[in-house]
Each structure stands twice: as C-alpha cells, then as structure tokens.
Amino acid sequence: MAWFFLALLIALSVLVIFLYNALVKKRQMVEEGWSGIEVQLKRRSNLIPNLIETVKGYASHEQETLDTVTQLRTSISSIPAGNIAGRAKAEGELSKALGRLFAVAEAYPDLKASQNFTDLHQSLDEIENAIQMARRYYNGAVRGLNVAVESFPSNLIASQFKFDKAEYFEIEDDAERAVPKVSF
C-alpha cells in the first residue's frame, strides 16, 4: 500500500513539473513574440525620420502631417513596456498618420518619382509585413499561454505559481485595421 502512495506521489510530482515547465515555455514564447514585434516597430520608427525628410523636401507646406507623424513617433517611446494595449493603440495611430503621409505624396509626382522615396516606401512596406508576421506569432503564443492558464489541470499549477493571461496585440478601431491603399 505504501508503494502505491509513493508511486502516486511521484506521478503527481512529475505531472506538476511537466505542467510548470510547459507554462514557463509558453510564457517565454510570449516574451519572444513581443520582442519580435518591438524589433520591427523600432525598425519602422528608425525609418520614419528619413521618410519625413524626403517628403519635406518636396511638400514643405504639408507641415501638419509631417508634425503629426513625428509627434506620434516620439510619444510611442514614452509608453511603458508592459502596456501592450496602449502600445497597440499608439502604433495604430502612427500607421494611420503614415497612411495620410503617403496620401500627401500622391499629390507630388516628383516625390513619387524620387528613387529615395520609392526605396523608403518599399522598406516601410517590408517592415509592415514583418510587423504583421511578428504580431501573428505573438498572438499565437499568447493564445497558447492563455489556453494553458485557463485549462484543467494546468490552471491549478498556473494559479499556484502566478502565471497570468497575456494580452493580445490588437488594433481596436476598424478604421485602423484597414490598410491604406497607395499606388505609384
């Protein structure tokens, strides 16, 4: 009888260790996913000053649009690292402002023909695609963690070891979800 209880205790211990390690892995995947998003957002942020300078040379009287993009880029750096919803909202506003910037560019044929502007636009498109892929990875990792945190029996381990659900990186406003159409 004692062997039975000892075997049961060992089996439960192994289960707890297995579930704990699975939760740790899922949390690390969420952190890795967020890091990937931040890298791509930083790349976009670094590209914006070059884009603004290029547009400024051709469309200097569009200062309000240029200032908005610059202000939004600067304000994003003040958002705390853990505020994913705030960051998603601010990044959505920046995407909208960039869409307006490219709409302004439509009115300037010389700007659209500029190789520098074309290269910057292409780089921004590539970065936006990378952001989208990073967001998908992150949200998939969040889904995996959240399912584990809420599912039995891992929810028992999650509550004991303070594993919390993670927040999705989403754009709330339907207008912000729409990709601006820009053609050259």
Image: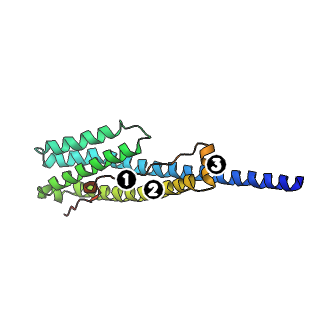
Indicate left or right for 21 with 67 as reference: right
From the image, tell me which residue sits under label 2. 139
Task: Choose the circle earlier in sequence order: 2 or 1.
Answer: 2
Q: Nearer the viewer, mark 1 or mark 3?
A: 3
What is the distance, in whole Å, between disc 1 and disc 3 at their CAs?
Answer: 28 Å
Indicate left or right for 12 with 150 as reference: right
In the rendered image, residue 113, in percent from the top left (x then y), is placed at: 17, 59
Asked whether the residues under the numbered discs 3 and 2 touch, taking CB atoms below 8 Å apart as contact, a structural biologist would say no
What is the distance, in whole Å, between disc 2 and disc 1 at their CAs?
Answer: 9 Å
Please give the label number shown on residue 170.
1
Residue type indicated by callout 1: Glu
Depth check: give the residue in front, 94 or 155. Answer: 155
- Residue for point 27% across, 60% down: 179
The 10 Å Cα crowd at callout 1, few under 14, some 14 to 19, many 20 or more, is some
- Residue for point 44% across, 40% down: 82
Residue type indicated by callout 3: Ile
Quarter of the picture holding the C terminus:
bottom left
Please give the label number shown on residue 78.
none
Asked whether the residues under the numbered discs 2 and 1 touch, taking CB atoms below 8 Å apart as contact, a structural biologist would say yes
Give the quadrant of residue 136.
Answer: bottom left
From the image, tell me which residue sits under label 3. 157
Q: Residue furthest bottom?
A: 183
Quarter of the picture holding the N terminus:
bottom right
Q: Secondary structure at mark 2?
A: helix
